[in-house]
Image (cartoon, grey):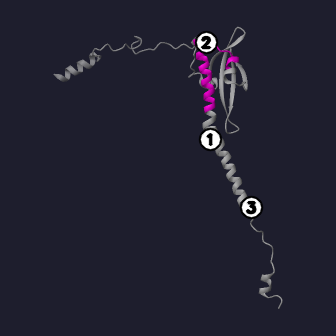
Amino acid sequence: MSDTPQESADQPSSTQPKSSGGGHKGLYIILAVIAVVLAAFCYETFLAPANLQAGFDKVAEAQFKSLADNKTLSNIDVREVLGKEPANTYEEGEEYVEVFHWMGGMIVNSHKLYAVYRKQGEDWTFVRHSLKPKEETDEQTIVIDPEAIEGDSEPPMETADDSGPPTEPNGEDDSSEADQSVNDDNNQ
């Protein structure tokens, strides 16, 4: 009778692993990863674009101040205003482009500011800056100094009768004669 059910209950049967919180460890790791991804997303969405826009605004403000003083900005001046060196430079025709990077929250994405210069004597003179490469901004570039870019003048506005731009109303009735004759026919 040594093999009774009571005796086997007193003796430890096979050893079962006891839970020591190991299941919660995986949950904490997952929550930490989610927190890091969420923080990176928030930085990418809110802080990185704000930093880029601040850099863009600094360069625009420096350009306006230099124009008010009848001076021009050089590439060295733009670097000083931004407080950083360009991450990439290249020449495109007669223009010299410096690309400044602001790291985004997502490692593969960086926010870029493109500063474009033209050669004037020995220095590179600032012409314009953009948040997109030249190919994407050719149609929408705002140029502070229109003489800096040759051949970008717009043709005068054309009208249907080639008379030039429409004139301002002078306070008189500006309805056409055709409208008046139709109204006169309806009144009779």
* Disc on res. 148: 2
Question: Residue extending furthest right?
Answer: 2
Q: Nearer the viewer, residue 53 or 167?
A: 53
Q: Residue at x 70, y 59 (%)?
A: 24
Q: Percent from the top left, x then y, of residue 124?
A: 69, 14
**Residue topped by disc 3:** 22
Q: Nearer the viewer, residue 117 or 14?
A: 14
Of marks 1 and 2, the one in the foreground: 1
Q: Taken as a whole, is the magenta stretch helix, strand or loop?
A: helix
Q: Residues within 10 Å of mark 2 (few under 14, many from 20)?
A: some
What is the spatial separation of the Cα atoms under label 1 and label 2, in whole angstroms?
Answer: 39 Å
Residue at 59% from the left image edge and 20% from the top image edge: 61
What's the amino acid at mark 1?
Cys
How many C-alpha atoms fall within 10 Å of the one at disc 1: few (<14), some, or many (≥20)? some
Q: Secondary structure at mark 1?
A: helix
Inspect the image, locate mark 3, and give the three-letter code of the amino acid beneath it: Gly
Residue 14, relative to residue 65: is it above or below? below
Give SS at disc 2.
helix
CB within 8 Å, label 3 to label 1: no
Q: Label 1: which residue?
A: 42
Q: Which residues are magenta?
A: 50-78
- Identity of the residue furthest to the left in this view: 188
In the rendered image, which quarter is residue 53 located in?
top right
- Report the residue at 50% width, 13% height from top: 155
Name the quadrant containing residue 81: top right
Count every numbered label the image shows and give the total. Answer: 3
Q: Is residue 49 magenta?
A: no
* Residues at marks 1 and 2 touching, judged by CB atoms closer than 8 Å: no
Residue 156 is situated, as x and y percent measured from the top left of the image, at 47, 12
Q: Residue 68 has which mark? A: none
